[in-house]
Image (cartoon, rainbow, N blue to C red):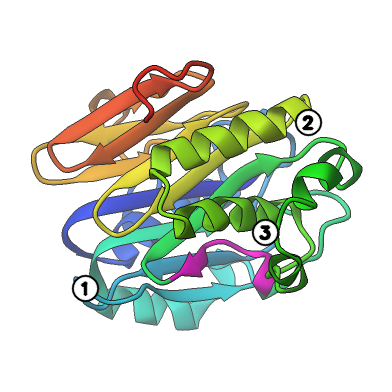
Amino acid sequence: MCRHLAYVGPPVTLASPVLDAPHSLLHQSHAPADMRGGGTVNVDGFGVGWYPSTDGAAMRYRTASPIWSDDSFAALARVTTSPALLAAVRSATTGMPVTPTANAPFVDGRWLFSHNGRVAGWPESVTAIAGELPVRDLLTLDASTDSALLWALVRRNLRAGQDPARVLRDVVTSVAAAAPGSRLNLLLTDGTTIWATAWGHALSLRVDAHRALVASEPIDEPPTWTGVPDRHLVEARPGHHRVIPLLTTTGVR
């Protein structure tokens, strides 16, 4: 099971939440607190996306190497700062390719996206949903994985100008209906706001007046974090958050 996190707030080094926090993504990659979906370590690569400027596109670093073995990233992360980031470590589902392009974050302009979980019955369970995408989108998937398909579904609706909360809700509920038993923790940011779903796995939230963090597991002292209930969506930015049931239209417009 993958682990992921997103941060928005005052500029921090990439190393701060990803490598240096007490239960950083690096620590979670080999000592996770919750692996109810199976697996013990996230050995199949990682990726980090961040924002070099407040009004430009996101940048991305991703590799199929384990995060603990990548000294080049560690050096980069300690000298690179950003007001927002999204990072993920990967434990590949059996049968999925282990390549850099299969790793989150997936990127489109300022959008960064990650998926923690799996689509049950892949790929047969979602062939009808995949068939709704333009052929070009299917031919240009980052990888032949469930996460890359979920990103293509999310990206299509973001490009159409739909509200991000509605986009995530619609993708999660439609895929869950087609593929019961799926685990669909999705994480999305545009560098100012974070949107995430809890569907079949843990998700935690920490928000104050200055910063917002959403992560598979708290990266520091748990008392400062709030668990997101299963089958809920969270929208968070500094000084604001809301948690919404995914199986109702109330509050998602």
Mark 3 and mark 2 residues within 8 Å of each other at the beta carbon: no
Name the kind of residue labelled 3 in the image.
Answer: Ala
User: At numbered mark 2, what does the secondary structure look like: helix, strand or loop?
Assistant: helix
User: At numbered mark 3, what does the secondary structure look like: helix, strand or loop?
Assistant: helix
Q: Which mark is residue 13?
A: none
**Label 1 or label 2, whichever comes before in sequence order:** 1
The answer to whether 15 appears left or right of 106 in the picture is left
* Coordinates of residue 239 in the picture (x, y in percent): 12, 37
Residue at numbered disc 2: 178
Q: Residue furthest left?
A: 209
Task: Name the residue at 85% across, 50% down.
Answer: 94
Q: Distance between the residues labelled 3 and 2?
A: 17 Å
**Label 3 or label 2, whichever comes before in sequence order:** 3
Name the kind of residue labelled 1 in the image.
Answer: Asp
Q: Distance between the residues labelled 1 and 2?
A: 38 Å
Number of callouts? 3
Name the kind of residue labelled 2 in the image.
Answer: Ala
**Badge 3: few (under 14), some or many (20 or more) residues near its Cα, within 10 Å?**
many
Task: Name the residue at 60% across, 55% down.
Answer: 151
| Magenta run includes residue 179 | no
Residue 90 seen: no
Residue 70 seen: yes
Task: Name the residue at 47% across, 60% down.
Answer: 159
Which tag is nearer the camera, tag 3 or tag 2? Answer: 2
Q: Where is the C terminus found, in terms of image quarters?
A: top left
> Which span of residues is magenta-colored?
101-108
* Coordinates of residue 203 in the picture (x, y in percent): 46, 31
| Magenta run includes residue 106 | yes
Residue at numbered disc 3: 148
Q: Where is the N terminus found, in terms of image quarters?
A: top right
Residue 217 vertical position relative to residue 104 in the rendered view, above or below: above
* Coordinates of residue 44 in the picture (x, y in percent): 70, 62
